[in-house]
Amino acid sequence: MNISLRWLNQYLQPHVSAAEAEAFLTEMGFPLESVTPCAGGDALLDVEVTSNRGDCLSHVGLAREIGACPRARRRFIGPAISDPHHGTQGDPARHFFRLENRAPEVCPRFTAQVVRGVKVGPSPTWLAQALEAVGQRSINNIVDVTNWLAFELGNPAHVFDLRTLAGSALVVRYAQDGECLKTLDGKERTLKADELVVADAERAQSLAGVIGGFDSQVTGTTGDVVLEVACWDPVTVRRAARRHRIRTDASHRFERYVDARTLRDAALRGVNLLLEVAGGSLAPGLLHEGGALPTQAEITLRPSRVKVMLGAEVSVAAMIAMLRSLGIDVAQRDEDALVCAPPPWRASDLTREVDLIEEIARLRGLDAVEAQDRVVVSPRAAPRQERVKREMRRVLAGLGFYEAVTFSFASREGAAPFVEHGLRTLAVDDARRAHEPVLRPSALAGLLACRRANQDGQVAQPGGVRLFERAAAFAETEAGASRERVTLALLADVPGEGRRRGHDDLQRAVRLVRGAVEALVNAALGPGASVRCLPGEVPCAAWNPDAFAWVEAMPAGVRIGRLGLIARSLQDQHGLEVPLVGAEIDEAALLNLPDVRGSIRPVPAFPSIERDLSPIVLEETRWEAIAALVDRTGLEHFEALAFVGCYRGEQAGAGRKSLTLRARFRAPDRTLRHEDVDPQMNALMEALAKELGATFRLA
């Protein structure tokens, strides 16, 4: 931030020298990059301003900081601001001009004033020299006033030639997709629907918060003008500025937040200067449109907390004096509670108690904070979610999965198969990301690229390569709302010999990944949890629709992710030789579920008996239905049911499959005999035949 020493001293009494300004600003946290002497005893100060202090991108803001510096002993004197509308005669501004704000959510307030009969010409010497002292070229008296406002108060402004505005109107609205705007730099720009413009009744006249329009600029023939002072949503301004590769003094300030409550004084200051340097007559009425002004937030500061944080005793009176020197309203509620209301220009920066404590430390001097010989640390157990994340990594490593860390960006072709229905990709416009401009919609995109790199390196593992990654995935809704979620992604080769894989190999691989997901759920929720896989429609083209399922955590019945075979087209796209099975677990959905505690039981004292059964059922019969039927049957001494295998072929019949299941029986007080189990197996066969139409073959 370029600062003129002479300009800075307009707001300080007594004045400071360049060396004093450097010392005081550095002490307040604004070090100088350089000090350049200028003609007439002035000096150009290049001040380093952090991104959270947009209020200090102005001479008044930095003068206010010097005024608050205890060692400086300077008094801050703000610019005198009067309201020229009082007593002004003539037709009101609304008679000449209409103002409409259709986007108050991103334009909290827009003010406009009409000045008629201005004379456009060179700026007076004091104004031109002041702007030139901070590296600004003097353009004309009208435009120079707007630049003065930005450098004096930190409030960017813009002037429109009223004659050029169709319908004598200014309308704040979103651009139409593909709408064209010729900006002040003479370039024709094509706008997108998420960009904000200030338009007249027919077309866009400026890119809001970034740059004005060419057609409505002030020229030598301008007579009537509209002075705009507004504030904008920082994200909206930043997005438009980066997309069009425009960096202006205005966008630099709006990206760092300008409070709507500062606009009135800035607008009055601007119109007074405009009348002074360009003449003309003011149409009565400060027009404004937008939402309600922000309320003054209150923060409770505990003096006891100040002592703990700073390690020093600071009197309550000293705290109040320091905070008030920064423009903060302070009232003492009781012995350990100060109610503080930050001023509008610090509203985005001071939001918590610790922010106020930092201000006290800054004014006391960071060198006054004593260095301690020892640090007292109270060890605490890691939060549950952190413990669970570590345990899930440990479980996957134990199952033969290698953790990968892949890049957050992908090519458009690589990202497209993972874009879910109703969503679209998020991309950046940076030329350096020309080949991979898209934020990954799934961590599997990176794992597939990693698997290809392993294949090229001829990496081989017993049972196939298995990878996992915990990473964020990004997407955007059709309405433009971004969506970010953290997922745990798994990718595993279908095991087998050579490059061909049979149906049994594919089944075995899907069961392997399902087992890994169940182990993760057990690690996160406890041994009493399990998973249920529900076949359904694939959400995107990355999955094989014939081998896909949604995953629910039981007993909660909450969907936590998906698993299945990777689509053959995606496998071919990455040039992978063997099929793969993938899974994606939504970390937040899983970790927000309550623990399912398992019960502690003694080791069985007596052996079990296992019996295999091979029912032939319809192809569409799901394992879940068989498991539920076994539970309902109420078999005596029944302990567990396990899946062994599945057969499809001529012996099973068309449209049918033969499942082999294994039932385990155990008694707590004796060793079971076969005649104890036979009736239970007969009952199970009868139930399967009756409810599922099963027939049987010998196991």
Image (cartoon, rainbow, N blue to C red):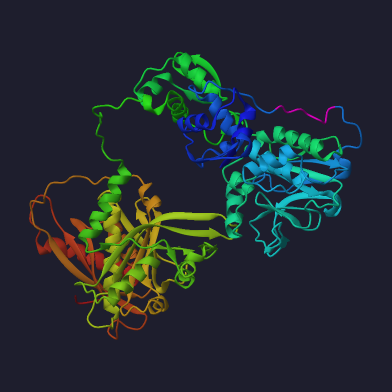
Identify which residue, 108 or 50, lies in the foreground. Answer: 50
Which residue is pictured at 65% across the width and 56% down the height? 195
Please, which residue is most extreme toward the right here?
A: 90
Identify which residue, 425 or 159, lies in the foreground. Answer: 159
Does the rendering let one see residue 538?
no
- Answer with the quarter of the image where residue 277 lies: top right
Which residue is pictured at 49% across the width and 29% down the height? 24
Instruction: Report x, y in % for residue 21.
Output: 52, 31
Residue 284 lies left or right of residue 232; in this view the side is right
Does the rendering let one see residue 126?
yes
Q: Is residue 498 magenta?
A: no
Instruction: Report x, y in % for residue 581.
Output: 33, 70
In the displayed structure, would residue 187 be above or below residue 54? below
Image quarter in which the N terminus is found: top right
Image quarter in which the C terminus is found: bottom left
Please, which residue is most extreme toward the bottom here?
A: 650
In the displayed structure, would residue 586 be above or below residue 5? below
Determine the main secondary structure of the stretch shown in magenta: loop
Q: Is residue 82 magenta?
A: yes
In the displayed structure, would residue 444 be above or below residue 343? below
Instruction: Report x, y in % for residue 453.
Output: 31, 73
Identify which residue, 49 or 598, lies in the foreground. Answer: 49
Instruction: Report x, y in % for residue 467.
Output: 29, 65
- Answer with the quarter of the image where residue 569 lies: bottom left
Residue 384 lies left or right of residue 277; in this view the side is left
The number of numbered badges drawn on the structure is: 0
> What segment is highlighted magenta in the picture?
80-86
In the displayed structure, would residue 458 be above or below residue 511? below
- Answer with the quarter of the image where residue 585 lies: bottom left
Residue 49 lies left or right of residue 596; in this view the side is right
